[in-house]
Image (tube, rainbow, N blue to C red):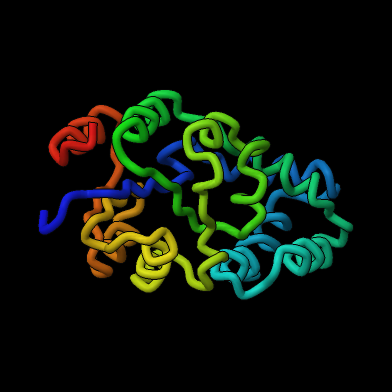
Amino acid sequence: MTAPVSLVLFDLDDVLCRYDRSARIAHIAAVVGRDAQTVRQAIWDSGLEGRADAGLVGDADYLDELGVLLGYPLTLNDWLDARRAAMTPDAEVIALARAVAGRHRVAVLTNNCRLLADYIHYLCPPVAEVFGAQVYASASFGVAKPSPELYRRCVSHLGTAPDKTFFIDDVEANVAGALEAGLHGYRFVGTEALASELAYYRLL
C-alpha cells in the first residue's frame, strides 16, 4: 500500500446482502398483474434501470416511466416493497463491516437510484444500523460502476483519497474500475476470504 487505508467502501447487493432479482420481479408482477417477462423488460431491457443508476433520470420520473412501461401507476411503496423482498442481509458480512467500522471509516457505494440510499433503513435495517447515512447510490454522482469516475467522485465527496480507500465488490469489472481509479480493490467471493483480506490490510 502507498498510504494507510482510511475508508473501507462496501458494495451492497451480493456483498452486504443477498439480492434476488427474481423475487423483485415476482413482487412487482403480482402488484401490476403482468407476467415476469414484461416486468423484466420494463425495468432492465428498456434501459430504464441503467439510466436511473447513472443519475440520468430522477426518482419521480423513474417511477412514472416505469409505471408507463408496466401500464400501471406504480407507487413508491410498491417499489420499496419489491426491492425489500429481494434483499436478504448477510449477517456474517455485516458483522465484518461492523468490526471494521469500530476502527475505520466505512461507507456503501452501490449501483442504484437514489431511492435505495434514501430508504435504506426500511430496505435493509441491518445495513443501516452499521452504515447510517453513509450509503451512497451511484445516481448521486451522475455515473455508474464500473466507470472509474464514479469512484473518484465518491471518495472526493467523502473527503479522502483513492489510494486511502479499500473497495469491495462481487463483480470483477467493478473492482477493475476501482483499481483504475487508484483505489485498493477486492472481489468478494465469500465471508472467510474477505475476513482474511481485511486482516491482511490491517482493517480488522
Between 46 and 119, the one nearer to me in the picture? 119
- Nearest the viewer among 37 and 180 is 180
The quadrant of the rendering that contains the C terminus is top left
Horizontal side of 25 relative to 91 (left or right) equals right
Seen from the viewer's position, the closer of residues 42 and 190 is 190
- The residue positioned 62% from the left and 66% from the top of the image is 52
User: Vertically, is 159 above or below 204?
Assistant: below
Q: Residue at x 76, y 50 (%)?
A: 35
The residue under the point 55% across, 36% down is 128
158, above or below 57, in the image:
above
- 35 vs 130, left or right, is right
Looking at the rendered image, the quarter that the N terminus falls into is bottom left
Percent coordinates x, y for residue 101 in the rendering:
36, 35
Quadrant hosting residue 41: bottom right
Could you say which quadrant of the image residue 125 lies in?
A: top right
Please report the residue visible at 41 percent of the width from the left and 58 percent of the height from the top.
158
Look at the picture and state if 15 lies above or below 48. above
- Number of numbered discs on residues: 0
Q: Is residue 157 left or right of residue 203?
A: right
Task: Using the rendered view, name the quadrant where residue 77 is placed.
Answer: top right
Residue 106, horizontal then vertical, whole percent: 38, 43
Q: Position of residue 88 (x, y in %)?
A: 54, 31
